[in-house]
Image: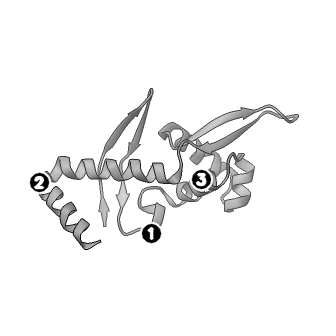
Amino acid sequence: MIIRLIFVYSSCKRMVKLDRINLSNEGLTKFFSPIEAQIMEVLWTNEKSSTPEITVKTGIPLSSVAGTLDRLVKAGFAKREVDKTGQKVRYLYSATESMDKTANAITKKVLDSLVDTFGKVAIENFHTYNNKK
């Protein structure tokens, strides 16, 4: 089951767009593509990583990692900095926020959208869901 929701979140000057949630997928792939999910897991578990390091840890081809990292940076989930410590200039990537903070932001966006769309019915269902836990 795929639910299409459009979320626009303003943080500083960048816009984060999360426009597709696939409820039938497992784990992070409900919100991220499988490649994005693997890369984000690496970024959340490592302080900073280069594109080749992420390729080694995930087994994803370098060109796919580089393109996906660009999209994650543009979406505000990852950040890029220049490392000039070696003989070559290279980029290091890290997550902009912890996995928990990212999960909280995504959850809030989903809940806000459900309330905007379904109003009182959504709120009543949240209450029912809370009582089941």
The answer to which of marks 3 and 2 sits earlier in the sequence is 3
Q: Which residue is mark 3?
A: 44
State the residue in front, 26 or 126.
126
Residue 93: x and y in percent read 65, 42
> Regarding mark 1 in the picture, which secondary structure is present there?
loop
Q: Which residue is mark 2?
A: 120
User: Split into 4 quadrants, where in the image is the N terminus?
Assistant: bottom left
Image position of 117 (left or right of 76): left
| Residue found at x 55% / y 39% | 73
Q: Which residue is mark 1?
A: 26
Q: Residue furthest right?
A: 87
User: Label 3, label 2: how many angstroms apart (C-alpha)?
Assistant: 36 Å
- From this view, report whether residue 34 is shown above or below residue 72: below
The answer to which of marks 2 and 1 sits earlier in the sequence is 1
User: Label 1, label 3: how many angstroms apart (C-alpha)?
Assistant: 18 Å
Q: Does the CB distance between marks 3 and 2 fall below 8 Å?
A: no
> Regarding mark 3 in the picture, which secondary structure is present there?
helix
Identity, as a three-letter code, of the amino acid under mark 2? Lys
Q: Residue furthest bottom?
A: 132
Residue 30: x and y in percent read 41, 61
The answer to which of marks 1 and 3 sits earlier in the sequence is 1
- Classify 10 Å Cα crowding around label 3: few (below 14), some (14-19), many (20 and above): some
> Regarding mark 2 in the picture, which secondary structure is present there?
helix
